Amino acid sequence: MRDHSDLQAMNDRSLTQQAAVRKATFSPGEVKALRPFSIWEISQFMFDVPADTLRRKLADDPSLPQGETEDDGRQRWFSLAEINELRRRVKLRGKKLAPERPKGRAMRVAVSNFKGGVGKTVVAQHLANAAALDGYRVLCIDFDPQATLTHSMGLNDVKEGNTVWGIMCRDLCREADRIMSTYDDPDDCPYPAADELPDDVQSIGAQRIQDFIQPTCWPTIDIIPSCANAAFVEFASAQYRGLHKAWTFFGCVARYLDELPDDQYDLIIFDCPPAIGYQSLNAAFAADILYVPSGPGYWEYDSTTSYLGQLGDAMEDISDGFATLAADAGISLPKQFLDVRLLMTRFEVNNPLHSAMMDAFRNVFGADVCAHPIEMTRAVEQSGRFQMSVYEQDYRQMTRETWKRARQSFDRAYGEFKETLLTAWRENAAKKEQ
């Protein structure tokens, strides 16, 4: 017979192995570092100009970042910080290199589906990396207790209180005090004040807004991380709802993000767990755009269909059951997304079954299906195995064409994502100005 102690022992063994894998994957100091980028990459994939044009621009102005040469003495390599300085200071063909940034707060995108293995984390990671290389400042929020996105960003030692669970505790304390303040006589309030909540909730609730945000090896990507111990957040959230029935639990993350300065980030990406629960609902209610990855098989299609229906039902139930409480908390219901997109992942161009499933998705969901799927390549497979995105992989470690094909697949998907993002962003900015 086996009980919880066996599961805990298995977890301990696995954590030891994880540490060894990360040490071998990243560096002897277990710190993940972002590689430099060559002039060939920068000119072809970032600035869209001939490499010789960029070289001439650098030669004409020695005050610009010049990068570093490696063993062959010819190819120059630049850090992302140097690339961003070039974006700020250089014009090529009369055009600025900085990306479009409409007015207002950062746009928020939830990458979500409750089918495991469809590529949620791969999509979230690659969109974040692509946006950073495009010149945007990105905040990732890892809602998934598996913490794969957190690990892929190089973070290993994460405390439970610094995860989304901590944000929910902080929100509960703040909301408890706000609701209490609406009563002329606190004794008339049927709900507990913050100082009547459990001690662990109060201690975490005392954190400052920036305490949850951690830097990554990418200078323009930060993360609110997750960890395996954060899995109990679903149980804790149910307990907190029982303690404070007027708490609009689904608005925690949205309220938290509303406190951030509008200009701190350009894009916020949520990596959601494979379930519809307190965390995924928080992601949905905080998101401007919902991105739903799906593999090219029937079971993924079936699961995606169920996910859309169950998420819709859950959001409808909240709209009906929490209408008054939400209005008091300043939340507009029903929740509305600026856009909803479905993205095919692990797609094999020459696989007739995959093509048939893509046609089925398009027949059912029409223009909501992204035109450019994520193709399955050797570089994509390695991105999961080594916790490194295609953008982080050095093309010298494989054939350049293999790396280039994978990069172009993600670039096409990112280009379509960026168009969706900017369209929604402009519309949102226009509404705010009215």
Image (cartoon, grey):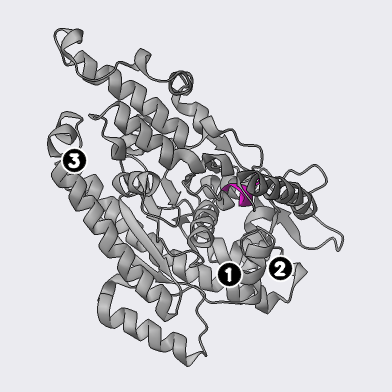
State the SS at label 1. Answer: helix
Q: Work out how far the residue at label 2 is from the one at label 3, CA to CA, in angstroms.
A: 45 Å
Quadrant housing residue 261? top left
In this view of the protein, which residue sits in the foreground, 98 or 322?
A: 322
In this view of the protein, which residue sits in the foreground, 378 or 162?
A: 162
Please give left or right for residue 24 compared with residue 385 in the image.
Answer: right
Please give left or right for residue 223 compared with residue 69 in the image.
Answer: left
Mark closest to the chain's N terminus, 2 or 1:
2
Q: Residue at x 46, y 46 (%)?
A: 143
Q: Work out how far the residue at label 1 is from the one at label 3, CA to CA, in angstroms.
A: 38 Å
- CB within 8 Å, label 2 to label 1: yes
In this view of the protein, which residue sits in the foreground, 132 or 186?
A: 186
Q: Residues within 10 Å of mark 2 (few under 14, many from 20)?
A: some
- CB within 8 Å, label 1 to label 3: no
State the SS at label 3. Answer: helix
Q: Which residues are magenta?
A: 150-154
Q: Residues within 10 Å of mark 3 (few under 14, many from 20)?
A: few
Residue under numbered circle 2: 395
State the SS at label 2. Answer: helix
Residue 375: image location, x then y, percent: 53, 76
Amino acid residing under circle 3: Glu
Quadrant housing residue 89? top right
Amino acid residing under circle 1: Arg
In the image, residue 286 lies in the stretch drawn in magenta: no
- Relative to 164, is 310 above or below? below
Amino acid residing under circle 2: Tyr
Instruction: Provide the major secondary structure of the magenta segment.
Output: helix
Residue 334: image location, x then y, percent: 16, 48
Mark closest to the chain's N terminus, 1 or 3:
1
Q: Work out how far the residue at label 2 is from the one at label 1, CA to CA, in angstroms.
A: 10 Å
